[in-house]
Each structure stands twice: as C-alpha cells, then as structure tokens.
Image (cartoon, helix red, strand yellow):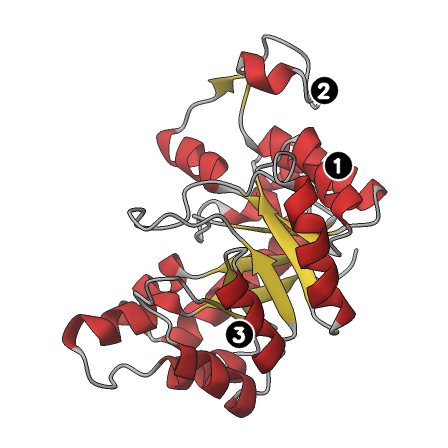
C-alpha cells in the first residue's frame, strides 16, 4: 500500500500569536519544527480577515521552510493574485464565512462548477496543484473531476463528530440522490468517506482528507487505501502545548503508519 502523507496546519500557532500581538509564538518556527519531525507538508489558511495567518507568514513559509506549502484560500480575486505571486506548491479552495470559528463544511463544487472551472485552470496553468475541500458526496466528487482539479480533500468533520459521540446517523433525503449508499441504513460517516475516496480515485483525482482528526479517530481514515494525504492542525497544535510539536507530530505519524497496514475493519477491531 502506498505511504500516507501528513500535512500539518499551523494556523492556530498564528491564532495564539495574534491574541497578544507581537511575534510569538512564530508560525515559521512551528513549520520548521514540523519539518524536523518529518511531516510531508505545511498547510496554512489565509483568510479574508487575516485572523491568524498573515500575508507575510505565507511569503516566509514559502521562502524559509523546505516543505511543500499548501495554501488554503477562498475563491476570490484577492486570493488569486496572492497565489499567483507567491506560487505555493498547492492550493486548497475552501468555503469561507467571516463569522465561522473554523471551516464548517465543504465547498459546493456542484453549484459553483461554472465559476470554479476557470479559477482552477488559471492556478494550474501557473504550475500550482489545486484541490477542492468538499463533503464526501458523489455529486461533489464528480463536479471536482469535471472542473479539472487535481485533487479533492474530503471533509471529515461529520465523521470526527460522530466518532466522538459514538453513534451512527441516518442518510438524509438530500444525500440519497448521490447513490453512495443504500437508503435507510444507519451508518457511520466513515462509509461516506470510504466510498467517496473510491469514487474520486476512479476519476483520477488524488484523495486527501482532514478536519477534526486526532489520535483516537485517525486510524480508520488512514486505513482507506485511496487516501494519499491527511491534513491535521488544531488537535496537534493543542497537543503540542503538553508534549511539544515534534513529539505530537511523530505520534500521529506512528498511528497513521500502523493503521495504513491494516483494513478499516481491523483498525476498528471488527476483524
């Protein structure tokens, strides 16, 4: 089975810095520590309101850290101009609302297909790989393929929430049309992720996943063979308060690698 990449989102190092102003803690230093821990990439979200990562952070991350930079951003002309100037390794297009604490759901690629297609094309014509952060639904995966994105990042927030609650959920009427799962079954959202990953892979999209992943719930997602990359941030930055960033990243890597050699059923103790 192919190795699974680990990208670390350092946004919340910048959140802590911005709470007091000044320069500490430095997100660039955090990125260098992550590189030392042998992560595969850095993710940073440049929001419209600059609540955590700033423009200068993005420029320094690209110039000073020897890891691929994955820039999360909204589909706006301002962000397009920044991306074309900085030229990160990759762009992940995400939905963005000023009032949200964190990204609350996937980009509606199906509804925004006409607008996304030329936007994505411009970025990829300039050598920047584009992924779309989407909910694990067939309609969204198929739209991403038609748009021409190179990758999708499957939103694992519903899975993480349900895992924490220890319960399944019923497919909603709006989801039945996606033909991922039979009607009226009680399922863990992991099933949506597994089947969306398989569909994306069959459409020649590289498959990533992230949001709400931690030591306890990452195993079944890491075991999905079509997933090539996990992007994890808030949990690892929080854990670093107690054990240090390098140790937190190394433990996550160990759990991911162990799970990668098992099936999701084995990870859950069902086989």
Residue positioned 69% across, 36% down in the render: 196
Residue 171 x %, y %: 55, 16
Q: Which residue is mark 1?
A: 142
N-terminal label among 2 and 1: 1
Distance from Cα at disc 2 to Cα at disc 1: 12 Å
N-terminal label among 2 and 3: 3
Q: Residues within 10 Å of mark 1 (few under 14, many from 20)?
A: some
Q: Tell me the quadrant of the picture where the N terminus can be found.
A: bottom right
Residue positioned 58% across, 33% down in the render: 190
Q: Which residue is mark 2?
A: 179
Write down the quadrant of residue 197 in the picture.
top right
Q: Tell me the quadrant of the picture where the C terminus can be found.
A: top right
Which sits in the foreground, 122 or 228? Answer: 122
Residue 170 relative to residue 177: left or right? left
Would residue 253 be visible to someone looking at this image? yes
Residue 38 x %, y %: 57, 78
Residue 252 to residue 141: above or below? below
Would residue 41 be visible to someone looking at this image? no
Residue 210 x %, y %: 53, 51
Residue 37 to residue 155: above or below? below
Residue 85 x %, y %: 59, 80
Which sits in the foreground, 186 or 140? Answer: 140
Q: Are marks 2 and 1 in contact (CB under 8 Å)?
A: no
Q: Residues within 10 Å of mark 2 (few under 14, many from 20)?
A: few
How many discs appear? Answer: 3
Distance from Cα at disc 2 to Cα at disc 3: 38 Å
Q: Which residue is mark 3?
A: 82
Q: Residues within 10 Å of mark 3 (few under 14, many from 20)?
A: some
Q: Nearer the viewer, mark 2 or mark 3?
A: 3
């Amino acid at each position: 089975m192919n190795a699974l990449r680990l990208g670390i989102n350092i946004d919340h190092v910048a959140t802590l810095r911005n709470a007091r102003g000044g320069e500490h803690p430095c997100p660039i230093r955090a990125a260098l520590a992550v590189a030392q821990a042998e992560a595969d990439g850095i993710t940073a979200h440049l929001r419209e309101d600059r609540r955590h990562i700033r423009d200068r952070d993005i420029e320094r991350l690209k110039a000073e850290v020897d890891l691929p930079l994955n820039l999360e951003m909204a589909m706006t002309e301002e962000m397009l101009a920044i991306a074309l100037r900085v030229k990160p390794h990759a762009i992940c297009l995400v939905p963005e609302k000023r009032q949200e604490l964190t990204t609350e759901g996937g980009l509606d690629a199906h509804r925004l297909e006409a607008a996304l297609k030329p936007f994505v094309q411009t970025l990829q014509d300039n050598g920047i790989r584009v992924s779309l952060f989407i909910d694990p639904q067939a309609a969204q995966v198929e739209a991403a393929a038609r748009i021409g994105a190179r990758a999708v990042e499957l939103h694992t927030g519903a899975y993480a929430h349900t895992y924490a609650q220890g319960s399944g959920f019923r497919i909603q009427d709006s989801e039945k049309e996606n033909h991922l799962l039979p009607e009226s079954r009680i399922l863990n959202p992991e099933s949506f992720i597994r089947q969306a990953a398989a569909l994306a892979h069959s459409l020649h999209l590289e498959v990533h996943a992230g949001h709400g992943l931690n030591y306890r719930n990452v195993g079944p997602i890491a075991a999905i063979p079509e997933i090539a990359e996990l992007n994890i941030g808030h949990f690892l930055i929080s854990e670093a308060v107690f054990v240090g960033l390098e140790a937190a990243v190394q433990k996550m890597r160990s759990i991911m690698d162990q799970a990668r050699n098992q099936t999701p059923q084995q990870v859950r103790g069902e086989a």
